[in-house]
Amino acid sequence: MNIHRRLLTDKTDIARTINFRKMPVIKIDLADRKVLFDNDGYIVSQKVLIDAGYFKTGEPYYIRADIRAYSDEPYFRFHQGCTCLTNSFTYEDMEEILDYSNAPIVKADEDILVCIVHSGKREVYSPMIMHTAKKIDKHCAVPLEFEDYVVNADARIFLRCAGLDAYDRQAKYEEA
């Protein structure tokens, strides 16, 4: 099993990676957790764009997504949102467009830097370099995975830091 997740602890390496744009940088704020019921819910990153090639016209094809980890599936995964067509252009539409306007672009088979903070507690965690899988599935709710995500994308500790109960549904099935 390949380990493609490593923590950056040296301040110079962190600054060099972020400031010189060696790889896409994605922020997850644990204070922005989404609670579904009780302590179940999920943490979510800023908006990202996944590079899925080009349209026939030659224009770039980006999948709009974010990175999420759910309390019942405690692994970081890219999550593609849905599209809803309306006959009016509202404030929420403009807000979403602006969120994606400066979003980092993520490609298959590349390293990304995931920086996790808790703005409510003013805490920072060591940034993680994670490697994306080699294949993008344009028609799936999870268009891109992390390599060996069960090992490399474990998010249980961050879910707990966000105040969510983190349990592994797969481990519960294996115990039964």
Image (cartoon, rainbow, N blue to C red):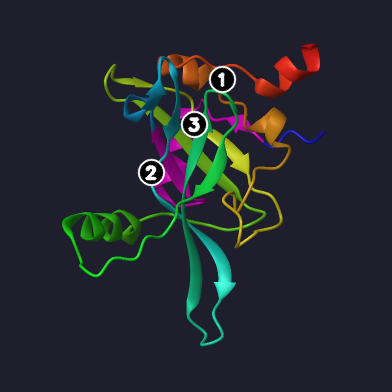
Q: Is residue 31 left or right of residue 17?
A: left
The magenta stretch is: 5-28
Dividing the picture into quadrants, the one containing residue 134 is: bottom right
Considering only order in the chain, which callout, 2 or 1, is on the residue closer to the N terminus? Answer: 2
**Distance from the alpha carbon under mark 1 to that under mark 2:** 19 Å
Mark drawn on residue 46: 2
Q: On screen, 172 above or below 63?
A: above
**Distance from the alpha carbon under mark 2 to that under mark 3:** 15 Å
Q: Rate crowding at label 1 as few (under 14), some (14 to 19) or many (20 or more) other CA atoms within 10 Å.
A: many
Disc 2 secondary structure class = loop
Query: On the image, numbered disc 3 is attached to which residue?
Result: 127
Mark toward the viewer: 3 or 1: 1
Dividing the picture into quadrants, the one containing residue 98 is: bottom left
Q: Residue furthest left?
A: 91
Q: Rate crowding at label 2 as few (under 14), some (14 to 19) or many (20 or more) other CA atoms within 10 Å.
A: some
Amino acid bearing label 1: Arg
Query: In x, y percent, where is residue 130?
Result: 60, 39
Dividing the picture into quadrants, the one containing residue 45 is: top left
Q: Quadrant of the N terminus?
A: top right
Q: Residue at x 25, y 59 (%)?
A: 93
